[in-house]
Amino acid sequence: MSNVYYPDYLQLDKILGAQAPESDKHGVEAHDEMLFIVIHQAYELWFKQILHEVGSVITMFGDGHVDDNGGELNIAVHRLQRVKTILGVLVHQMDIMETMTPLDFLDFRDLLRPASGFQSMQFKILEARLGLRMEARFGKQYYTSQLRADHKAEIEALENAPTLLELVNAWLERMPFLEERFWPAGEEAFFSRLEKLYTAGLVEGEQGNAALWNKLFVEGGPDRRLSPNACRSALFIMLYRDEPIFQQAFRFLEALLDIDEGMAAWRSRHINMVHRMIGLRVGTGGSTGKAYLKGAMDSHYIFSEIADLSSFLFERRKLPVLPEKLRNALRFGA
């Protein structure tokens, strides 16, 4: 076995030699371009790690069977929580970026055209793998227009690959505890009770929300990415999360919402940084700058339909008692 040498193992000659400021090529003094390059390279390395974690979770869910006895759901939760932590690091990296003033940026900004962070392939791949389909993207006509032909084809090919959101939908649909064998009076009767509890709790100004119940849990629709059966399962997990068997499933759903929140926080911080740096000017890649980023932040939530289900929660003391057969099925075996 050969000895491993630290600089060789990390290929530091490649990493530390990968900074080539455009200002140096043009003989322009732009001290902060090095900072700009290092920060964006660090972002891309973190995107690579996030894709590594998300890809492993997609593989776990992709075979149509999440092995709880083998700890797969525990592993998925752990890895998605790691993604949440990395997204927090990405937000805090803006603190370093903002030590560069707008005038410092102007020293080299025009030398970057038409390159732009909008051309980050890894971030686009991450959005696609999580579940953001092309038709749901803000400014979809522009979304791939700045990419090289091979990169554009790679993004478009992902439209035919299963997303994490689609696999989560299938996983929720497979949850066995809403099957008829556990419900002497029928599961429909149970959800009718839940609907009455929900509508009884609506306050002034919320009465129009009554129709939401049918849309989410009965009818579905082309604008909904979670099926009614998946929504029922997710709501059941959320309402009865204190049952030990549901703890990891609930934490998994929470981890998905954490990722949405983390990506939105990164986008929000990015918007403020861009506004601070270039005001209302267009981006180097030709986007509308702050306006485009704001539109993407508002419309690119991927797991928002899970967050919607919080509309239908109520106090624990009002939860219907579960049938004895189901209660026994939810317990861990002796």
Image: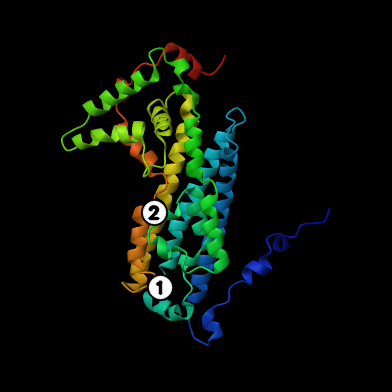
Residue 286, label in figure = 1
Note whether 142 is above or below 70 in the view shown.
below
Q: Determine crowd level at label 1: few under 14, some 14-19, many 20+ residues with C-alpha closer than 10 A.
A: some
Q: Secondary structure at mark 2?
A: helix
Q: Specify the amino acid type for callout 1.
A: Gly
Which tag, 1 or 2, sits closer to the chain's start? Answer: 2
Q: Nearer the viewer, mark 1 or mark 2?
A: 1
Residue 8 appearing in the image:
yes
Q: Nearer the viewer, residue 221 or 17?
A: 221
Q: CA distance from mark 1 to mark 2?
A: 23 Å
State the image coordinates of residue 269 (x, y, percent, origin top left). Answer: 38, 59
Callout 2 amino acid: Ala
- Residue 109, picture quadrant: bottom left
Q: Which residue is mark 2?
A: 265
Q: Tell me: residue 270, above or below residue 301.
A: below
Would you say 142 lies left or right of 54 here?
A: left
Using the image as rendered, state which of residue 240 and residue 172 is in the foreground.
172
Residue that lies at the very extreme toward the left in this rendered image: 204
Residue nearest the viewer, comparing 211 with 101:
211
The C terminus sits in image quarter: top right
The residue shown at (60%, 37%) is 63
At 42% across and 48% down in the image, what residue appears?
302
Q: List x then y, in percent, for residue 132.
A: 45, 51
Residue 12, percent from left and from top: 67, 66
Q: Quadrant of residue 202?
A: top left
The residue shown at (50%, 29%) is 174
Q: Is residue 268 visible?
A: no
SS type, badge 1? loop
Q: Is residue 203 above or below residue 269?
A: above
Which residue, as the protein is rendered here, is positioned at the far bottom? 27
**Image side of residue 138 versus residue 121, left or right:** left
